Amino acid sequence: MSSTVSRRNSCRGSQCGNRASFECHVRRRGSSCSYFSSGAQTEEFSVSLSQSLFTITLRFLLAIDLWLSKRLGVCDSEESPWGSIRPLVRLVEFSGHVVPWFIGTVYTLLCGETVAEQEIMLNLALALLLDLFLVRVVKTLVRRRRPTKNRSDIFSNFFVERYSFPSGHATRAAMCARFLLAQLVDTTSMRVLVVGWAGLVSLSRLLLARHYVTDVGFGLAMGYCQYSIVERLWVTWDCLQDLLLMRLQERLSRVYGGLWMAEWKH
């Protein structure tokens, strides 16, 4: 009887030992899995943390841009704090519009007395067209909406502009200012006036809540760089005359060749 009890106890002891070893093995596997899972979670947390920091930085800069633009838009309407000077600010804004600049440039080109003056006005007209093209391309790619406080005025906007980035007035002001400083202006007082005009035109877009601060800042930098392109692609009057003469000769030769072939067929 005692031998039977001892055998049962030994069997129970072996079973308990097997269960303990199995639980210990499972615990070890669980601890290793928890170790690797915690490592994976740490890596994922670091990646998400880096992304969140980048996102937070962008949102912080955007918030500063929106806040500063809202604070500067003091002439967005007649009821605004500086609404009494809104007509004057709109007049400054209109001085940077492409329509008066292009009309004045073409008129001076056609009525120019010297070849050098006509050459400068020709390149200024080409620079204005280049500015319109580049601004349109960037606005179409970015597609940033204008501020909600913006009010379209017939006097200030001849074309409906849905997008805000970059400011076309700012790019035009910076490019024309650098163009005038390099080609036409040679006195200190006139240089101050030109630079001041460019700054006032850019500021008018913020006071009227037409653009955000980043739109104007990027527009000034873009317009400054545009003159470098114009300077590299400068069209001389002799080159233009040679080009027009070559085109005229090609057309005359085509017309003469067509007449000669018609007479030969008859």
Image (cartoon, rainbow, N blue to C red):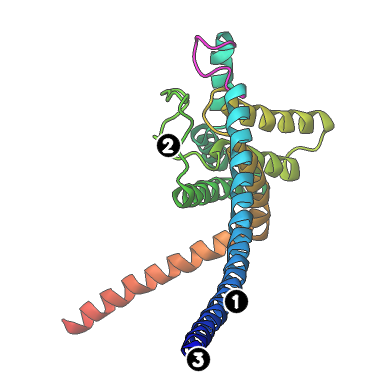
Q: Earlier in the sequence, mark 1 or mark 2?
A: 1
Q: In this view, does 159 lie above or below 25?
A: above
Q: Number of callouts in the render?
A: 3
Q: Is residue 79 magenta?
A: yes
Q: Quadrant of residue 90?
A: top right
Residue at (49%, 68%) from the top-left corner?
246
Report if residue 114 is visible in the image.
no
Residue at (45%, 38%) from the top-left corner?
145
Please name which of the two marks, 2 or 3, marks the residue nearer to the observer: 3
- x, y percent for residue 151: 44, 23
At label 2, counting other C-alpha atoms closer than 10 Å, the crowd grade (few under 14, some 14-19, many 20 or more) is few
Frontmost residue, 94 versus 183 = 94
Q: Which of marks 2 and 3 is nearer the N terminus?
A: 3
- x, y percent for residue 184: 72, 40
Residue at (47%, 34%) from the top-left corner?
146
Q: Name the residue under label 2.
A: 161
Report if residue 263 is visible in the image.
yes
Q: Residue furthest left?
A: 266
Given the image, on which type of amino acid does mark 3 rest? Ser
- x, y percent for residue 257: 32, 77
Left or right of 236? Residue 254 is: left
CA–CA distance in space, label 3 to label 1: 37 Å
Check if mark 1's residue and mark 2's residue have beta carbons within 8 Å.
no
Q: Name the residue under label 1.
A: 28
**Which stretch did the figure color magenta?**
72-81
Check if mark 2's residue and mark 3's residue have beta carbons within 8 Å.
no
- x, y percent for residue 28: 60, 76
Q: Name the residue under label 3.
A: 3
The rendered magenta stretch, by its main secondary structure, is classed as loop
Q: Earlier in the sequence, mark 3 or mark 1?
A: 3
Frontmost residue, 160 versus 228 = 160
CA–CA distance in space, label 1 to label 2: 67 Å
